[in-house]
Image (cartoon, rainbow, N blue to C red):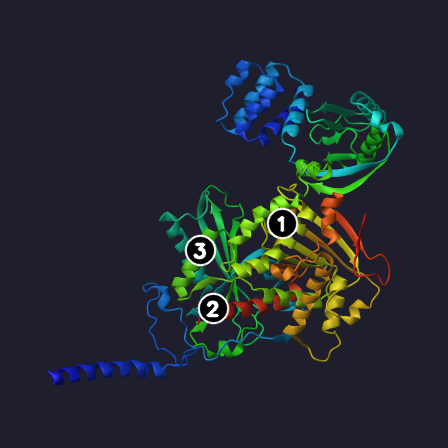
Amino acid sequence: MDAQVRSVLRRVIQRIPNKNIENLLKKWNCLSADQLCALDYTRPKWMIVEQVTSFCEENRLNLKHITNLEMIYHIENPDKGVWHACQLTEAQDDAVGVDLTQFKEQFKAHLHGVVRHISIKIKKHEDEAIWIRIAWGDNFSKPNHLKPTYVVHHLHTSYVFISNLMAKHKIFLCQALVIATKHGSIKDGHLSTRSLTAMRELLLRRYQQVTYPAMFTVTKHLFAGLFTDPCIGKEHSEHEEMRYQMSCEAFGHGPTPKLETAVYRLETRYRGNGNHTLSDREEFFRGVVRFSSSSLLDSLRHCVASGMAEGPVTPLLSAITQRGRNYFVITDKGPGVSSQASAQRA
Amino acid sequence: QIFFLLFFWLGVFLFIMEGRGSAVNTPASRPLTRRSKSYGRSCVEAPSYFWQTPGHLTVLKVPTSRGAAKSQLITNKVDPEHIALLVKNEWKLSYVTPLHHFRHTQLKSYSRHLAAFIAAEKQQGVAVEVGLEAGFKVTFTAVLGLAETDEDAETVFIQIQSKPAFAAAADAPKVVWRGWLTCVNGDPEYLRSLPSDFVSLPLFCTSGSESLTTLVKTWLERAFDCNFGSLALNSTTLNWLAALWTGCHPTCNIRHLKLAWSLPTQPPLDVSYTVNPQDAWELWNSIHPEESTDDKIDIKEVQSFINGLETHFFRHFKIYLSAGTLVKVSTALGSAHLDGKIKIGNSDYITTLLTLLTESALLKMPT
């Protein structure tokens, strides 16, 4: 095992808490039962790394095995790193007929054709997701296994999720994806987050949509305790009901996908409080608004439900869930526009 | 028996009268009379008797208007090396009551005493720093030139360096803690009213470990009969900074005006709004024109500025930023956080920032 392989192995082991290492190694299935028993997970991390490394040397494991281990780690822990979404467009007629073998062949063939030194690994996970690991080299240097790109795609959906892609490799990857999935082009999805799970939930609509009446009975109990006077409670409950309904329509009910941020680049004319000098001018009042929270959609939903935001929910915010993106450039449609600004793609 | 009762009640009556008499003599508001206490030996009595400093002849008012931020080449007044000490660090703010018998001429002696104090505390087992320090070197320096008025006392900068146990003589000692006491444009009436043996340096900025900060504060409290408290900024101060800094844009590129709010949702939502500096300046200029003959900025104009930004935000997102709290303001000139943390970005406008902070410190002090 050369130095690079050892580095990859060391990095994987160092990232995992000691208690999870055993499971990962078992799934990997490259160490013998004796070796697995011999490992002591109570020892300091560096000792475990050394032990595992020596077992791998004993078993004469090579780069292939180690990169497999890294891939298993990422598949089991999809919410590490930063993921970006891309969307495939202009599906050709035979796009629906693409199967896994075809995809793999085409994808690898294209990349091997354009990049001299490259290492590609493709795995299909039980939930129908295709995981791809790419270590990039170039005309003169071997693939760099310390900075691999990871790509996740569900066949026959139009979304691709990418992590750790350098700008100079983007064009190669995009071309390969477009060809292998038989689409016309691919574009930026304007959605990035730490949690691949959240991204998939949002885009593949895996989280619960609104079934409003069932949820309201729950919240009625939540709000009931707030008002001691039943008359005040009754007065308020109508407003609460309406606000709650609006918040669920925009952001769903129940657990939401765990997004962390949403960024809006504002290029609209000034709409402050009756300030005539500024409201009359043609130029935009530029700024960038960034919302962040440990669970953005929950915060926004609470914002609407509690009255901190006025309903109906502005399309700027509901676009996060409706359009599945968290980066927007907001412009006025033209001079003398009406009060609503539209969300446009960058 | 009746006589006895009569005398008894007379005694009680007189007693009550005396009590009431003294209550009448003392005004209900701030004490105007000086209390002549003997401050005696500072290390013996508990600090709580001493921090009620006499001399509050005036009530400190919260200003509703102030002059615009003036740029000045501070390096004309202050040694650039000293300026470099203040800029680019993040400082935690505290206020401190006036220092008794503090002499700018005794700084070397204070350095020695504080170093000895820290060493003694460390020997007693008070945790200071993890490491193999043999000792600490403390330096008190006077930073001349920051004081603006005649009543302001000169700034004092304190630096603590650690001497590692096994270092060679040539090894540079590492700075482990910094702090400075300052007073910039302090309320002149208040400062004049202090007795002559008190020095007011109400703003204390620190950077370094909490344990060292506590030690330094303890020593200062014992040596100069003063009392410290944490200085949290309020949203009015942050609003002033936003407006004053924006007003500087023509002369000094502020690069951006970034405001951060925190809304009390579950989980909490942070909203940051970074405004293009030119656009922010145009908004400010439309409220308080640059050419206006009156150099004073009124608090209403500041509020109008912030309201304008909040309203522009509301028109887009329908979220009431006023439901949350403004927690941080930052531009290239510096940043200020509600928790009482500041960063000085550019020394040219340092006087403006320090004036506001000195004011906050004086207002926060218990009287």
B264 sits to left or right of A272: left
Identity of the residue drawn at 55% across and 76% down: B150
Q: Mark 2 lies on which chain?
A: B
Of circles 2 and 3, the one toward us is 2
Instruction: Name the amino acid type tagged 3.
Output: Thr
Q: Is circle 1 on the same chain as circle 2?
A: no
Q: Gap between marks 1 and 2, in whole Å?
A: 37 Å
Q: Mark 2 points at which residue?
A: B365
Question: Does residue B327 appear in the picture of this structure?
Answer: yes
Say what secondary structure mark 3 lies in. Answer: helix
In the image, is residue B331 above or below residue A68? below
Say what secondary structure mark 1 lies in. Answer: helix
Quadrant in the picture for the C terminus of chain B: bottom left
Q: Name the residue under label 1.
A: A299
Of circles 3 and 1, the one toward us is 1
Local crowd at mark 2 within 10 Å, few (<14), some, or many (≥20)? Answer: many
Instruction: Name the amino acid type tagged 1.
Output: Ser
The image shows residue B110 at horizontal and vertical percentages of 43, 61
In the image, is residue B183 above or below residue A345? below
Identity of the residue drawn at 54% across and 16% down: A35
Q: CB of mark 1 within 8 Å of CB of mark 2?
A: no
- As rendered, which of B260 and B357 lies closer to the eye? B260
Q: Mark 3 points at which residue?
A: B214
Q: Mark 3 lies on which chain?
A: B
Identity of the residue drawn at 73% across and 60% down: B315
